[in-house]
Image (cartoon, helix red, strand yellow):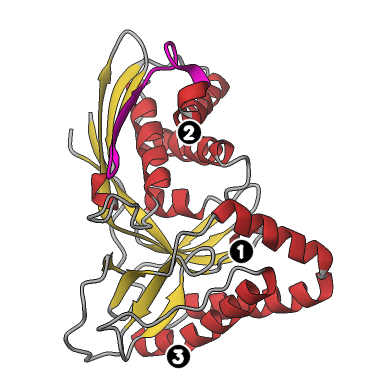
Amino acid sequence: MKLAVPGNLLVAGEYLVLREGGPGLALAVEPRLRAEAERAPRWKVAVLMGSGGASWSPVEDGARENRFLWSLLEAVERAALARGLVLAPLELDLDSRDFSRADGRKAGFGSSAAAAVAFCLLAGRGAGLGGNELDAFALEAALDGHRAAQGGRGSGYDVFASFHGGAGLFEGGRVPRWTALPGFALPEGRVFSGKAPVSSAEAVAAFEAWTRREPAASARLLDASERAVRALARAPDAAAFLERLELARTAGVAIGDAIGFPARLETPPGFEGAIFKASGAGDELGLAFFPPGARDIPPGLGRVAPAGGPSWNS
């Protein structure tokens, strides 16, 4: 069994997606994680990434060596048990090297969520599932396992985007929702690096502390952010998207400043004339969107353009 799963980006809705019903505009994007699996006497996973590779076996290594893969295995076992299925052990290869920069660092395309989707689709298909039953099994397990690996805090937008493909309005909560936006009109966009890596866990903790400390002020900013995100998701064309993006950007900057994780991006060389928006926590990753007709657009780390969902190669 061979499978390719797209990466993902959050265009707008940082921190909102952590709330019940909080919206985020998300995309599946290239590149893709390549995965393959075959039946084996026991579970074993080999991982290739920009910084190297590793192998993991639950029998030999348990949870000590790789909490992420252990969480995924437990999640597929729970999903199988709920359906009366018996999982067949697999030997899997997960290759996320295309998600890395030349220096080996992650480029910010959500490789862990893509890996979770690939792992759970392969596990479900290995158990004999197909069609809608496979989709329901894999999405449930991928969300469950990815969240568990993050200490229960993950919104799931990244899992949903990589699973569904295309552009969508994600709404967070215990049971998230995804509304596909087929044909969504995006202007030409690029991903670029921000100042320095940001700890998502620390940013989320700061956000949660802020909402408890300043409930009225945080409610006003979050309401403004939600209105901006929902308006952005309704943009009828690329020109309207650019106009509405500024509202989402302004709200994101205000929230970042309030929690102590600024989302103010510096203009990289060659990106003059673009409209900028941080993606994720702080200013680690930036999105640049160019007006229609712009020329000599730099390559950046990748394009901001909707990609198709997971594709089976065998």
Q: Which mark is residue 243?
A: 3
Query: Mark 3 or mark 2, which is nearer to you?
Result: 2
**What is the CA distance from the residue labelled 3 to the residue labelled 2?**
39 Å
Three-letter amino acid code of the residue under disc 1? Tyr
Q: Which is nearer the eye, 252 or 156?
A: 252
Is residue 122 at all visible to an observer of this figure?
yes
**Residue bearing mark 1:** 15
Q: Is residue 243 above or below residue 160?
A: below
**What is the CA distance from the residue labelled 1 to the residue labelled 2?**
22 Å
Packing grade of label 1 (10 A; few <14, some 14-19, many >=20) is many
Q: Is residue 284 above or below residue 40?
A: below
State which quadrant residue 151 falls in.
top right
**Residue bearing mark 2:** 68
**Residue drawn at (33%, 30%) of the image:** 122
State which quadrant residue 260 falls in.
bottom right
State which quadrant residue 268 falls in.
bottom left
Return the disc, 1 or 2, that comes first in the chain's sequence.
1
Packing grade of label 2 (10 A; few <14, some 14-19, many >=20) is some
Q: Which residues are magenta?
A: 47-63
